[in-house]
Image: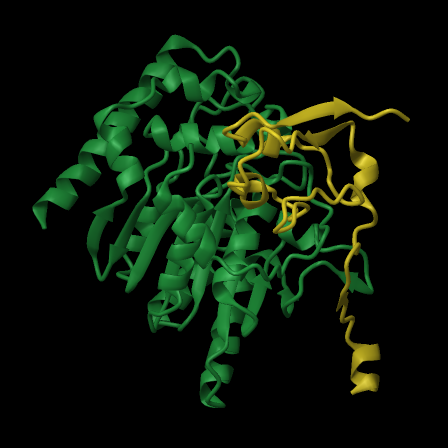
Amino acid sequence: MSQVRQRLAISKPTEGAAGKTGTWRVFKPVVDKEKCNQCGLCAMYCPDSAIDADLNVDLTFCKGCGICANECPKKAIEMVREEK
Amino acid sequence: MISLQELDTIGEIPQEEYVLKCTSACAGCSDSLALRYVLKAAGPDTVLVVPACCTSVIQGIYPNTAFNIPVYNIAFAAAAACASGMSNAFRATGKKTNVIVYAGDGGTLDIGIQSMSGAFERGTDFLYICYDNEAYGNTGMQRSGATPMGARTTTTPTGKIDAKKDIDAIIAAHNPPYMATAAAAYPQDLFKKVQKALTFRGPSFIHVLAPCPPGWRFSTEKTVEIGKLAVKSGMWILYEREFGKLTINPQSKAAMKRPVPLEEYLAPQGRFKGIDAKTFETLRQHLVKNIKKLSAEEAEE
């Protein structure tokens, strides 16, 4: 099997296969936990599943697209410019 | 506010992610958004066949991949032919593995159409998903058969003069057991349709609208908003066709009764900037005609 693996170019599933995409970000999402009603729409619409079931944003991978902030029905997420 | 019905479906969708953090897709990409739900619905016993398209370039850097299921990358024209062989081999060995082709609009409407038509004609047991961003996205937005009239791409700098190819009618002519349209902006709907499509034996087809921020020239946070506007304006109609019987989905029925003006869908997109009145009117008439045609077909049955 290992020989076959070497001859066929097979990739293995790994987290961070495309690098730490969080470095792409210009604006980062900041969640106002007081306004948040835990509806989970942000996690549902996140294209990169960077928001987990407890609605914490994984800033190592979040690309900062801002869909979560745009779709939040309570307007509890604000996009804040990254300071470098 | 989120409705109770929506909460129900969120609960049904498994937490398991098959698209690991993170693909190299652009920020706000609806391809990764749609793929997340396609794979959640299909589950781990699935093989994805991917022709040349955005999905084949966003997987990550060898020897790693962000996709946690087997993926077979193949040439543009061969995806459905490959899936045919794969599906037959699985069935011959008694396996029920789902074979899903996940192709872009170029790989479906233009280059891949002959192998797809062949696979549908042979009655291959597989699911063909076309995610449609209405141009050749990963090579820099050249016009495809799916580009709508009036949209500017790098090869149609003054706006496309031909209408969008009606791939759904071409598929319907093959009489597959199940075909549907979906949108990345409605993930629960997409999830349900993929689950349903996989219960049918034989070929099934799902056409997913996938707004593309850099290609359609809108800012990244509007991906879902624009996808919803496409449905609400009637430019994109959500329906299912089961053994030829058409059912228009409630989202699109509501849109048919009280449509959002077409301007609201076109205005946020840079690709429609400066569209002339004549082209706009043709687009609008095409939209009205399409709605009439589908409503008449549904009423007939």
**Residue drawn at 73 percent across, 50 percent down:** B22
Q: In this view, does A62 lie to the left or right of A53?
A: right
Image colour for chain A is yellow
Query: Residue B164 or B247: which is nearer the viewer?
Result: B247
Tell me the green chain: B
Query: Residue B87 or B96: which is nearer the viewer?
Result: B96
Q: In this view, does B285 lie above or below B204?
A: above
Question: Residue B101, image x and y in percent?
Answer: 51, 62
**Residue drawn at 41 percent across, 67 percent down:** B119
Question: Residue B151, image x and y in percent?
Answer: 50, 24
Q: In this view, does A20 lie above or below A2?
A: above
Query: Residue B186 or B48: which is nearer the viewer?
Result: B186
**Residue drawn at 66 percent across, 54 percent down:** B56
Question: Residue A71, image x and y in percent?
Answer: 53, 31
Q: In this view, does B182 lie to the left or right of B80?
A: left
Callout count: 0
